[in-house]
């Protein structure tokens, strides 16, 4: 793909997301999502392999179905209310269909089936794009209609996403699939609190994006795609290896890292809403996901030479461009003290 083509593609992705976020009309929001989806298809299919073609097809079908559901919901609402305003989504049937379509676009359970397979068939850079930037537009739309969605739907989908995200990642050896289930798990927290405190849901997804971005960038830098590769990354860069382990612990929600603060605030909000049972269930599901995060940290930090695995080790890479990550890793790990100052 030529530089001019890449520029047009990334510009279309950016414009599509901004168009959806800034629109107050369902039709314009739908057009923005469609522009975003069509622009990312050439990026997913860029490797020219069978897996990439399969991932592109799955992504297109899933997003097309979600877009059709979104258009159906908004059309039914127009018949009922007479306008396309996003904030005027009053019909319960339309609201339910719209919530399901947005969950499908994000990759949340129970319509998550496409996300692990698509990430596994793409490059690490494309996986980063799908798990971060591509979630911004659907989350923004869900934020705008959160007052009209029945809390039972959001809570049920959120808890299911937490459970599937935790259980799905335990038995994985491919890091891209692990990060996909990690994304599903985090979306569960975001969707659950969306019913009670939408601002906190936005804070949680922004924190996840800040933590996930350096993880993918470092895995790309070290060409690490499996747990077996990860156990020998100390030969490539000790600093990056330690940073990935700490970022994984932060994503799992362990204190004193950044990932702990959103979870603590979410649990505090659930308890203040007299939903102690739901908060307890969220804690139990987070322990499941903690298992595979600790597994990654163990492989990185405990299996060091001379007790490392007998896998062939990569020698130190030359001319590593790690300057952006030098700034991103401390930010992703230690912005905990700034989060309480954010109004929610």
Image (cartoon, rainbow, N blue to C red):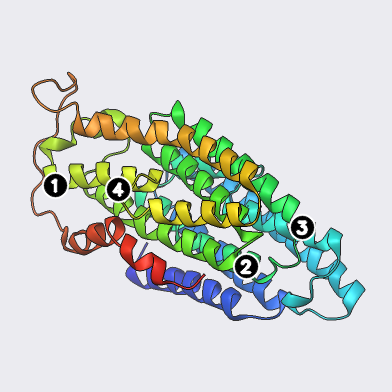
C-alpha separation, residue under disc 3 versus residue under disc 4: 34 Å
Query: Residue 297 in the image: x percent, y percent?
Result: 28, 35
Query: Residue 234 in the image: x percent, y percent?
Result: 14, 36
> Which comes before the other along the chain, label 2 or label 4?
2
Circle 1 sits in a helix, a strand or a loop, which is it?
helix
Query: Residue 24 in the image: x percent, y percent?
Result: 68, 81
Image vertical order of residue 40 relative to residue 303, above or below: below
- State left or right for residue 342 relative to residue 91: left
Query: Residue 16 in the image: x percent, y percent?
Result: 55, 73
C-alpha separation, residue under disc 3 versus residue under disc 2: 13 Å
Residue at image position (58%, 45%) is 279
- State left or right for residue 266 relative to residue 80: left
Q: Which mark is residue 150?
A: 3
On the image, which quarter does residue 199 sit in? bottom right
C-alpha separation, residue under disc 1 versus residue under disc 2: 38 Å
Circle 3 sits in a helix, a strand or a loop, which is it?
loop
On the image, which quarter does residue 85 sit in? bottom right
Label 4, on which residue?
247
> Which comes before the other along the chain, label 3 or label 2?
2
Label 2, on which residue?
143
Residue depth check, mark 1 versus mark 2: number of the one nearer the observer: 2
């Amino acid at each position: 793909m030529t530089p001019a083509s890449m520029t047009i593609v990334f510009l279309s992705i950016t414009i599509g997301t901004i168009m959806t976020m800034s629109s107050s009309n369902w039709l314009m929001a739908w057009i923005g999502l469609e522009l975003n989806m069509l622009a990312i298809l050439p990026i997913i299919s860029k490797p020219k392999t069978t897996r990439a073609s399969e991932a592109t097809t799955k992504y297109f079908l899933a997003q097309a179905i979600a877009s059709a559901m979104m258009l159906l919901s908004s059309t039914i609402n127009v018949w009922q209310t007479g306008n396309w305003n996003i904030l005027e989504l009053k019909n319960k049937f339309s609201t339910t269909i719209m919530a399901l379509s947005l969950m499908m676009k994000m990759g949340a359970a129970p319509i998550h089936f496409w996300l692990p397979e698509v990430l596994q068939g793409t490059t690490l850079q494309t996986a980063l794009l799908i798990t971060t930037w591509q979630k911004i537009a659907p989350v923004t739309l869900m934020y705008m209609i959160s007052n009209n969605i029945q809390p039972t739907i959001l809570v049920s989908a959120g808890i299911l996403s937490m459970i599937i995200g935790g259980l799905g990642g335990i038995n994985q050896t491919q890091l891209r699939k692990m990060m996909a289930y990690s994304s599903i798990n985090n979306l569960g927290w975001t969707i659950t609190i969306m019913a009670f405190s939408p601002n906190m849901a936005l804070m949680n997804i922004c924190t996840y994006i800040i933590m996930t971005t350096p993880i993918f960038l470092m895995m790309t830098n070290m060409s690490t795609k499996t747990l077996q590769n990860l156990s020998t990354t100390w030969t490539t860069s000790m600093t990056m290896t330690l940073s990935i382990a700490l970022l994984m612990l932060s994503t799992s929600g362990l204190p004193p890292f950044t990932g702990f603060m959103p979870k603590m605030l979410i649990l505090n909000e659930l308890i203040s809403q007299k939903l102690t049972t739901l908060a307890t269930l969220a804690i139990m599901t987070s322990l499941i996901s903690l298992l595979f995060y600790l597994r990654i940290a163990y492989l990185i930090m405990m299996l060091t030479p001379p007790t490392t695995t007998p896998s062939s080790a990569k020698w130190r890479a030359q001319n590593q461009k790690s300057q952006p990550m030098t700034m991103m890793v401390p930010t992703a790990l230690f912005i905990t003290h700034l989060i309480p100052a954010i109004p929610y």
